[in-house]
Amino acid sequence: MRAYLRGRAYGHARYRFDLTFDEKNVPEEWQPVLRERFAHYDYTFHGSSASDNPNSRLFEDRPDIEDYLIDRSFVVGSLDDCAERLAKLALDVGLDGFWLGFQSPTRELDPLAQLLPIASALQELTS
Protein backbone atom coordinates (compact mmCIF):
# COMPACT_ATOMS: atom_id res chain seq x y z
CA MET A 1 0.00 0.00 0.00
CA ARG A 2 2.85 2.38 0.78
CA ALA A 3 4.33 1.86 -2.70
CA TYR A 4 0.88 2.39 -4.21
CA LEU A 5 0.52 5.75 -2.41
CA ARG A 6 3.96 7.17 -3.26
CA GLY A 7 2.80 9.08 -6.34
CA ARG A 8 -0.10 10.64 -4.48
CA ALA A 9 2.02 11.53 -1.44
CA TYR A 10 4.65 13.16 -3.65
CA GLY A 11 1.91 15.07 -5.48
CA HIS A 12 0.62 16.40 -2.16
CA ALA A 13 4.14 17.41 -1.12
CA ARG A 14 4.99 18.99 -4.48
CA TYR A 15 1.88 21.13 -4.23
CA ARG A 16 2.29 22.06 -0.54
CA PHE A 17 6.01 22.84 -0.68
CA ASP A 18 6.00 24.60 -4.07
CA LEU A 19 6.58 28.14 -2.85
CA THR A 20 8.27 27.75 0.51
CA PHE A 21 9.15 25.40 3.34
CA ASP A 22 8.54 28.16 5.90
CA GLU A 23 6.42 27.04 8.88
CA LYS A 24 5.77 23.63 7.30
CA ASN A 25 7.90 21.54 9.67
CA VAL A 26 10.09 20.07 6.93
CA PRO A 27 13.52 18.94 8.19
CA GLU A 28 16.02 21.53 7.02
CA GLU A 29 18.57 18.95 5.83
CA TRP A 30 15.99 17.45 3.43
CA GLN A 31 14.89 20.73 1.86
CA PRO A 32 17.65 20.88 -0.81
CA VAL A 33 16.92 17.25 -1.78
CA LEU A 34 13.19 17.95 -2.01
CA ARG A 35 13.78 21.05 -4.15
CA GLU A 36 16.11 19.20 -6.51
CA ARG A 37 13.85 16.16 -6.92
CA PHE A 38 10.64 18.15 -7.26
CA ALA A 39 12.29 20.15 -10.06
CA HIS A 40 11.91 16.90 -12.05
CA TYR A 41 8.28 16.35 -11.05
CA ASP A 42 6.11 15.47 -14.07
CA TYR A 43 2.67 17.09 -13.80
CA THR A 44 1.36 14.71 -16.47
CA PHE A 45 1.22 12.14 -13.67
CA HIS A 46 0.26 14.52 -10.84
CA GLY A 47 -1.30 12.71 -7.89
CA SER A 48 -1.50 9.41 -9.75
CA SER A 49 -0.98 5.99 -8.19
CA ALA A 50 -0.45 4.40 -11.60
CA SER A 51 2.40 1.91 -11.76
CA ASP A 52 4.00 3.82 -14.66
CA ASN A 53 4.12 7.12 -12.71
CA PRO A 54 7.74 8.38 -12.90
CA ASN A 55 7.06 10.66 -9.92
CA SER A 56 6.69 7.61 -7.68
CA ARG A 57 10.42 6.94 -8.15
CA LEU A 58 11.66 10.42 -7.17
CA PHE A 59 12.82 9.27 -3.73
CA GLU A 60 13.40 5.53 -4.22
CA ASP A 61 17.02 5.97 -3.12
CA ARG A 62 15.92 7.95 -0.03
CA PRO A 63 13.56 5.73 1.99
CA ASP A 64 13.80 8.16 4.92
CA ILE A 65 12.30 10.98 2.85
CA GLU A 66 9.86 8.61 1.16
CA ASP A 67 8.53 7.43 4.52
CA TYR A 68 8.30 11.02 5.78
CA LEU A 69 6.28 12.18 2.76
CA ILE A 70 3.93 9.19 2.82
CA ASP A 71 3.37 9.44 6.58
CA ARG A 72 2.78 13.17 6.28
CA SER A 73 -0.07 12.60 3.83
CA PHE A 74 -1.53 9.26 4.82
CA VAL A 75 -2.08 6.88 7.71
CA VAL A 76 -0.97 3.53 6.32
CA GLY A 77 -0.40 0.21 8.05
CA SER A 78 -2.09 -2.51 9.99
CA LEU A 79 -5.40 -1.89 11.73
CA ASP A 80 -3.68 -1.56 15.10
CA ASP A 81 -0.94 0.73 13.75
CA CYS A 82 -3.46 3.03 12.05
CA ALA A 83 -5.77 3.14 15.08
CA GLU A 84 -2.86 3.92 17.39
CA ARG A 85 -1.54 6.69 15.15
CA LEU A 86 -4.99 8.26 14.75
CA ALA A 87 -5.72 8.05 18.48
CA LYS A 88 -2.34 9.66 19.30
CA LEU A 89 -2.94 12.41 16.77
CA ALA A 90 -6.44 13.07 18.14
CA LEU A 91 -5.16 13.27 21.72
CA ASP A 92 -2.03 15.32 20.86
CA VAL A 93 -3.87 18.08 19.04
CA GLY A 94 -7.28 17.83 20.69
CA LEU A 95 -9.28 16.59 17.73
CA ASP A 96 -12.82 15.48 18.35
CA GLY A 97 -13.12 13.86 14.93
CA PHE A 98 -11.48 13.44 11.54
CA TRP A 99 -12.29 12.36 8.01
CA LEU A 100 -11.08 8.98 6.82
CA GLY A 101 -10.59 8.31 3.13
CA PHE A 102 -9.78 4.84 1.91
CA GLN A 103 -7.32 3.86 -0.79
CA SER A 104 -7.26 0.39 -2.24
CA PRO A 105 -4.99 -0.65 -5.08
CA THR A 106 -7.60 -3.17 -6.19
CA ARG A 107 -10.72 -1.08 -5.40
CA GLU A 108 -12.33 -4.37 -4.40
CA LEU A 109 -12.32 -3.72 -0.69
CA ASP A 110 -15.57 -2.47 0.81
CA PRO A 111 -14.88 0.85 2.63
CA LEU A 112 -17.46 0.08 5.32
CA ALA A 113 -15.86 -3.30 6.00
CA GLN A 114 -12.57 -1.43 6.47
CA LEU A 115 -14.05 1.33 8.62
CA LEU A 116 -15.83 -0.76 11.24
CA PRO A 117 -12.73 -2.47 12.70
CA ILE A 118 -10.81 0.83 12.65
CA ALA A 119 -13.65 2.60 14.48
CA SER A 120 -13.78 -0.21 17.03
CA ALA A 121 -10.01 -0.10 17.58
CA LEU A 122 -10.08 3.70 17.94
CA GLN A 123 -12.89 3.48 20.45
CA GLU A 124 -10.86 1.03 22.56
CA LEU A 125 -7.75 3.24 22.45
CA THR A 126 -9.55 6.44 23.38
CA SER A 127 -11.92 5.04 26.03
Image (cartoon, rainbow, N blue to C red):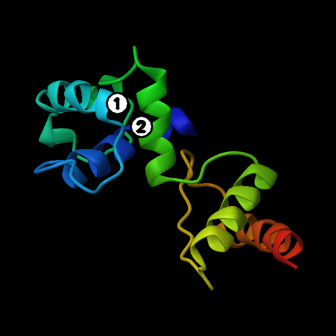
Residue 74 coordinates in the image, percent (x, y): 51, 53
| Quarter of the image where the C terminus is located | bottom right
Residue farthest along the top direction in this orientation: 61
Q: Quadrant of residue 114?
A: bottom right
Q: Which comes before the other along the chain, label 2 or label 1? A: 2
| Quarter of the image where the N terminus is located | top right
Q: Is residue 72 something one can see in this rendering? A: yes
Tally of numbered discs: 2
Q: Could you tell me which residue is drawn at 35 percent across and 39 percent down?
A: 7
Q: Is residue 86 above or below residue 63?
A: below
In the rendered structure, find residue 3 and report the number of the disc placed on it. none
Q: Could you tell me which residue is drawn at 50 percent across and 34 percent down?
A: 67
- The residue under label 2 is which amino acid type? Arg
Residue farthest along the bottom direction in this orientation: 96
User: In the rendered view, does 43 fall on the left or right side of 7?
Assistant: left
Q: Could you tell me which residue is drawn at 34 percent across and 23 percent down?
A: 57
Q: Is residue 22 above or below residue 118?
A: above
Q: Is residue 57 above or below residue 127?
A: above
Q: Residues within 10 Å of mark 1 (few under 14, many from 20)?
A: many
Q: Residues within 10 Å of mark 2 (few under 14, many from 20)?
A: many
Residue 20 coordinates in the image, percent (x, y): 14, 49
Residue 95 coordinates in the image, percent (x, y): 59, 80
Element carrying mark 2 = helix
User: In the rendered view, does 82 fall on the left or right side of 11?
Assistant: right
> Would you say the residues marked 2 and 1 are in contact, meaning their CB atoms lie under 8 Å apart?
yes
User: In the rendered view, does 17 fall on the left or right side of 85?
Assistant: left
Report which residue position mark 2 lands on. Answer: 6
Q: Is residue 110 something one can see in this rendering? A: no
- The residue under label 1 is which amino acid type? Ser
Q: Is residue 103 above or below residue 54?
A: below
Report which residue position mark 1 lands on. Answer: 56
